[in-house]
Structure formats: C-alpha cells, structure tokens
Image: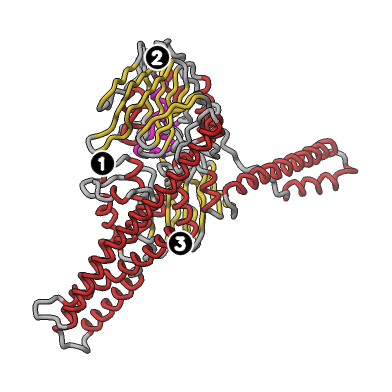
Amino acid sequence: MISLNNVTVAYGSFTLLDDISVHISESDKIGLVGKNGAGKSTLMKLITGEQSPTSGHIDMPADLRIGYLPQIMEHHRGRSVIDEVMTVFDHLHEMERELERINGELGERTDYESADYARLIDRLNEINDRLALESGESPRVQAERTLYGLGFKEEELGRHTETFSQGWNMRIELAKVLLAHPDVLLLDEPTNHLDIESIEWFEDYLKSFRGSLLLVSHDRKFLDNVTTRTVEILLGHIHDYKVPYSQYVTLRAERLAQQTAAYENQQRMIEKTEDFINRFRYKPTKSNQVQSRIKALEKLDRIEIDETDDAKLNLRFPPAARSGDVVFKGTDLTVGYPQKVVFRNAEIEIKRGEKVALIGRNGEGKTTLMRVIMGELEPFSGEAKVGHNVHIGYYAQNQEDILDRNETVFGTLDRIAVGEIRTKLRDLLGAFLFKGEDIDKKVSVLSGGERARLGMAKLMLSPYNVLALDEPTNHMDIRSKDRLKQALQAFDGTLIVVSHDRDFLDGLVDKLYEFRDGKVKEHLGGVADFLRKRKLESLRELERLAPVEKVADDRKVQAQESFQARKTVSKEIRKIQNRVDYLEKEIGKLEKRQAAIEQVLAAPGPKDDVMELTREYLENKRSLDAFTEEWGEQMEKLDN
C-alpha cells in the first residue's frame, strides 16, 4: 500500500536516513522505534508529503486517506470543542450541497443523451455512494462519543478550545484525526497527554481499527497492546521485526549475540588461515594448499555485526547553593482561572533538599501549582511564598512554545549563557547528544525528544538550587529517561516534578502531593510506598480510582472503604441516570421533529424544500437510532 524505496534524507553532509526501504501493507500495526532524533518523525513526514527525500521515491495510491497526528501541532482557537471537532465533517455538508445542486440541474435539463448529462449522473452516483458509506451514525453522535472516550465531559463540549491546556487541545486534534476515518493512521507519541481511561479507550479503538497504523511511542505497554510489528531506525538504517515491542527487544538482543558469536568464530578461522598462508607461502610443498586457502578467503562471505548506537546522555547538574529551610509554602491556597477554580484550601510545604512529585489526573492542578510557584499565577485566596535565596530552574511542558524555532541549537544556549560556561557550551551540548553538525540545526527541525533535551540543557547554564520539572520525560526515549533520573538522584538541591511515569519517579522522590477532586493531599515516602498503601499497580490507576483515607483503627478503615464504595456506586448511578435523562430528552425532541417533518412530506407545499427536509429526516433518524440504542444500554446498567 505504501512503499518507501531506497529513500535517503540528508542535511548537508549529515545523512539521517540512508537508502532505506520499507513497505506498509493494509492492516499493518507497526511500532516505529529508535532514539530521539533517529528519524522517526521524519519518516512520517515523508509519507504525508510534508517533507521530500533527498533521493529515492515513495509510492502509494492517489486516493489513500492518511490521518496524521504530529508531536507538535497548531491548535485552533475561537470555536467550542464540539464545533472544532465537527469541522472534520465539513466535506459531508459540501457533498450534500453539491448533491442538491446536481438534482436541481437534472430536474431542469432535457438533454438526456448528452455527455454532460451522463457526467452529472456519474457524479450523482459517486456522491450518493460516498454518503452511503459514511451514513451510519450522525456526525454529532460520532463526535461526542469520541470526545467522551478521550476524557471530555459533556459540560465541557461547549467551552472554547483556548480555555483548555495544550494536552487537552492535543486530544481535540486526535479526535479530528480519528473521526476522519483514514485508511492509514500515523501517530507520533499520541499518549503523552492521555490519562489511563483515555489510553484504555484509545487502545480498544486501535485494536479494532481496520486500516494501517504507524505508531511512535515510548510507552512499552501501549506498543505491546496495539502493534504486531516493530520497525527500528538505527544509525540511518531500517531493521524490521514481525513482532510486538517486547519480543523485538528479545529478538534484537539474540540476533546481536548470534552475530557477535558467528563474527568471532569467523575471525578466529580467518586468523588461523592467514597465519597458515604467511607461514607456508614460500614453501613449494605447501603451495597448492596455500593457494587453495587464499582463494577460500577471497570467496568468503564476511560476517558483519549490525551497528549499534551506544551514545548516552551524560548529565550532572551544577552544585546547588544553599537555600532557606523552606523552599515553598502554600497556606490555605485556592487557585484557578477566571472560568474555573482548580483546587481549594491546599496546604503545601516543600523543604530544602526534598524531592517531591506532583501526581494526579490531567487538569487537576499540577501545572497550575507550578505556575503559582514560578510567580506566573496569583492564587484566588491564601498565601503562596517562595523561601529565602531560592533560585528556580523551570522546565515547562510546552518546550516548542518556549524555544525560538528560528534559532540554532548552539545559539539557543549562547544567547543566554554568561560567564565561564560560555567556553564550555559545545561540551555541554555534547553531554546532551548534540554533536558535530547537530549544534547548527535549527530548533524548527528538531524532534520532540531533541527539544526536550535542549530545554533540559538550558537548566545547566545556572546553578539552580530548585528544579521544577513539568513532565520532563514526555518526549524522551527510554535510555535518556534513565540517565536523567540518575542525574536528578545525584542533584543536591530541591526537586519538584510533575510526572505519571512510575518507573521514573520510583527511587527518585521522597514525598508526593496528590491532586484529586479539587483537593491536594500530602503523602510521605516514595512512590512505591504510596502505591502499596493504596493497593495500586501504577500511577495511571490514580486517574481512575477515588482516594481512600488511611485511618488507624481497623473498623474505621472498613467503614471508610464501605462508605467510599457506596459513594462511588451512587456517583456512577447518578451519572448513568443523568445520561438516561439527557437521552430521553433528546429522543423526545427528535421524535417530535420527525413527526412534524413526516406531516409536511405527506403534503408538501410550494415553499417547502423537500430535499432539505428529507436530508434532515435521514440525519435525525440516524441520531434517533443511536440515542435509542444507547438508552437501552444505559437502562441495562441501571437494572444491573
């Protein structure tokens, strides 16, 4: 279906992709893996046509529909969530208008045998066929179901997109990609801003998706759950494995071990053969044997070991100057934005040398607290106070907005560096894997992972005694995450980090603040202790389960758990009942409107637009069928 044939992508003397060939068949589910900057995003841009190869060619059907979610994207403003998502169906409305125009023209023409008349009939049939293919549920129902699956609440669909965070706007763009019903999905790190419920919904969607999938992700479990083939980009070359990610890791290690063993055996044989040739080259009695072995070496198929990229992030944060005992103290904090209070009455105290994680669902206030700490946002009430001699280095989620796209990698640091560090910028960039010509790359061409590393490098330019890191590992590959963790463990200052990555936080932090349902709760100890107390497998489960207060008395614990269970069930029942009430209300409206349309169609007047009424009737019927089916499902839940 899609074939990349002998494709090379080069920037000057640097070759990113070197004469690669790969084929994507119908229904392939491919995980695209490799280090940050290896060329994964570039490969996707080649397929979409956003970038052209230096040499080689890409073949695909002209009518192939591609859905592409890049790492970095433009977010549209000025519309509500539902209106923005509904723009993906604009082509249907255009086809309906064209259908109406053609019907009107056919009604007036009498040249039934002409070529133009035949052309109109062909176009009419083509449009009808396209509309029939996409005439299952109404667009509105499809859009709402997808948005609910991605975590939006019913009352949020009317809010303007600019009132949501970057992560929620990414979900809007993802909804639009999915609702376009493409033949091929190209997804570049789609789970970075999704919580567990949305990821599970998305996994189910991708498992049932009938088209082809090319997926970039650093989430091993997600790759294993949705892909069946792994394509690795390594040092400009392609290695193709017909297995999911975990099996690929095992097979890759086995292949390298086998290659190494075979290479070493062959080298020993070659060494012995060359030694024999050198010893007996000039002895007449051995000349036949010598010549035979020379010819054997010339014909030998030499074993080569696949190149490996052993470059590693090599980080060490500068020594931190001593701050006051209390780095940040929030007393009775109520914080939010004009349209929403995010959390209330929070008590937060972070002391010198602590390593603290902020955990919880998206939108519960973790980044908002970071903004309060940085002085970017004033609380509605309460006091937020930064301690004595505190110097904060802040890493924000949206590095693509903070970094100057037109600046080079070297220029990004050179512009802000002062003092002796200016003489060591190349060494600093080398520690962050920017070597040789990499330092002259424009920020605009960097991958998400490379921008993450560059943003982290900026933090090394000053001896901060507090690091405030908001999702620092979102775009980092697995090895880079491990190296960053080691550097933060050795950091002698204070760390405040937002993350949902259990592996990254485990062994790194010694205190957690949990953000849940408008409240902030302190938990002492590491993430493993916290999960064990809460009987959870991962931080992702926090985004799904209600908190259970720890009480010393066993009876109180049982009573609290029982109360929480009843409360959760009651809340779920109320949620279902509210949905049933909404569906019944909408069904009633639609039935009333359908009856009115039927009455008009039974005896249309001269001013009645029969075509428009018929179109509305059919769309309402699709919505009515979908609402009625969902109403039955919700009622079954109530009965159970």
Name the amino acid type tagged 1: Thr
Name the amino acid type tagged 3: Gly
Judge left or right: residue 177 versus residue 339. Answer: right
* Camera-side residue of 276 and 252: 252
When the figure is inspected, residue 419 is found, relative to residue 546, above or below; the finding is above
Q: In this figure, which residue is indicated by the disc labeled 1?
A: 163
Mark 3 and mark 2 lie on one chain; the one further toward the N terminus is 3
Name the amino acid type tagged 2: Val
The quadrant where residue 131 appears: bottom left
Mark 2 surroundings within 10 Å by alpha-carbon count, few (fewer than 14), some (14 through 19), many (20 or more):
some
Residue 497 is marked as: none
Nearer the camera: disc 3 or disc 2: 2
Spot the residue most to the left. 606
| Magenta part of the chain | 436-460
- Cα–Cα span, label 1 and label 2: 33 Å
Q: In this figure, which residue is indicated by the disc labeled 2?
A: 326
Residue 211 is marked as: 3
Q: Indicate the position of residue 449 as horizontal and vertical percent values.
A: 44, 37
Spot the residue most to the front. 555
Judge left or right: residue 306 versus residue 79. Answer: right
